[in-house]
Amino acid sequence: MKILVLGGGGREHALVWKLRQSPLVDRIWCAPGNAGIDELAEPVAIDVTDLPGIVAFAREHQVDLVVPGPELPLTLGVIDALRDAGVRGFGPTRAAAQLEGSKTFAKELMRRAKVPTGFFSSFTDPDEAVRYVHEVGAPIVVKADGLAAGKGVLLCETAAEAEKAIDEIMRWRTFGAAGDRLVIEELLAGEEVSFMALTDGATVLPLASSQDHKRAFDGDAGPNTGGMGAYSPAPVLTPALHDRIMREIMEPVVRALAERKIVYTGVLYAGLMITAEGPKVLEFNCRFGDPECQALLMRFAGDLAAVMDAVARGALAGTTLDWDPRPAVCVVLAAGGYPGNYERGKPIRGLEALRDWRDGMVFHAGTARRDGEVVTNGGRVLGVTALGRDVTAAAAAAYRAVDQITWDGMHCRRDIGHRAMERER
Ligand code: AMP
Ligand code: GLY
């Protein structure tokens, strides 16, 4: 098989790394890639939003499968564009990707399919949004409806804070066009888990459970980020809870889409809050979580190319997924200032010594090669991922590797996996 992966983050490095291990794969490209990916895949200088460029490349090189990592090409319709050109892609069509691209679409679908989620209302007029806040009271969540890289979500303790959030999104347009419409929703309390499944629109096959750490600092403090670390499995997800999530959330959503003539294929990612009343949906994503993907693929023991091809061909029925029973922990190393402004181009030290690391893998995210040296090129720079006999051991192994890496301004959380470790104790 010839495969083209789209993206250049830690998730895509993990995808390329795992796809590379498949005996089915002869050739693999990645657009645009990063310093780590480029050692495993041939870099292609095409932007992930350049759909005509992607289609042309795939045709010219007779690519068998295109695997978009991030949501943006999916919500733009890369799968539809490829399909029209006779190329198979792994992921949902533009219509199906609305599940992530539009919170209003997702909430309405859930309401119709009776999938448990918090109450919500969406607005295009800031004055109406303010009136609603005063009607339902605080605490409350205010979100930009479009894509805002996980940052357009404001948790508000008071009505005054909510009013300020509405101003930020709609009047000051901090998140740009994502703020044309906003969603106000119930604040759900509990433990958060990421639940991902593969689906071809008919069969829904759950992946191992995982949990990420969204806040920037230890103790789940500070601003939201794309994710500062992750681990798999998430012990909060008992077998009973797992079955309930499949029955009450994953399967009904895929069915509800099918009833609307939308065949969802690819990864369906549900961000869930395990509340006192049971699991409730915070949001859906139409792709693998980053950094959950790094922890998951560290544990995945099957042939990823074969599985992805089965999804894309609509032939998932009968497939089983094998997992390393050992937990995996991924610690994200970020640039100084992230998730706010940060500098690029800082030389990274310590990577060479970890090349032959046996317990894990250093996945590159925002890195580039400059004059033979690996330098930082993004906010989340590396995802140091290790296996261990339990989460405590996996985290210890990951942090031993983290302690060998340094650059000017590097920061990371020191408590990745803490909830699972508390359970283990
Ligand atoms: P989102 O971009 O919608 O995934 O939201 C980012 C993060 O904000 C989530 O991972 C949660 O930690 C938090 N969050 C979002 N919506 C809610 C909610 N309704 N209740 C509580 N926390 C939320
Ligand atoms: N780590 C959360 C996400 O990928 O959306």
Image (cartoon, grey):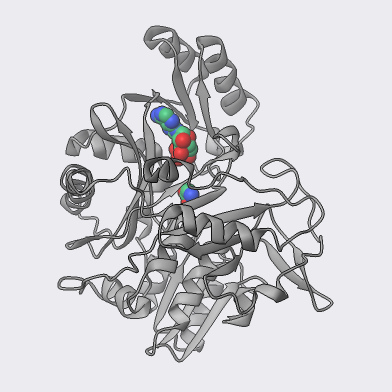
As drawn, 81 above or below 287: below
Q: Residue at x 56, y 44 (%)?
A: 415
Residue 145 x/y as whole percent: 46, 36
Q: Quadrant of the C terminus?
A: top left
Residue 241: horizontal and vertical position, in percent?
21, 43
Residue 290 shows up from this direction: no
Q: Residue at x 58, y 28 (%)?
A: 169
**Residue 265, horizontal then vertical, whole percent:** 29, 63
Residue placed at 30% from the left, 72% from the top? Answer: 312
The residue located at (60%, 68%) in the rendering is 362
Residue 202 makes an appearance in the image: yes
Q: Who is closer to the viewer here, 47 or 56? A: 47
Task: Give coordinates of residue 286: x percent, y percent.
Answer: 38, 54
Q: Quadrant of the N terminus?
A: bottom left
Position of 150 with respect to 244 (left or right) is: right
Tell me if 159 is positioned left or right of 340 in this view. left
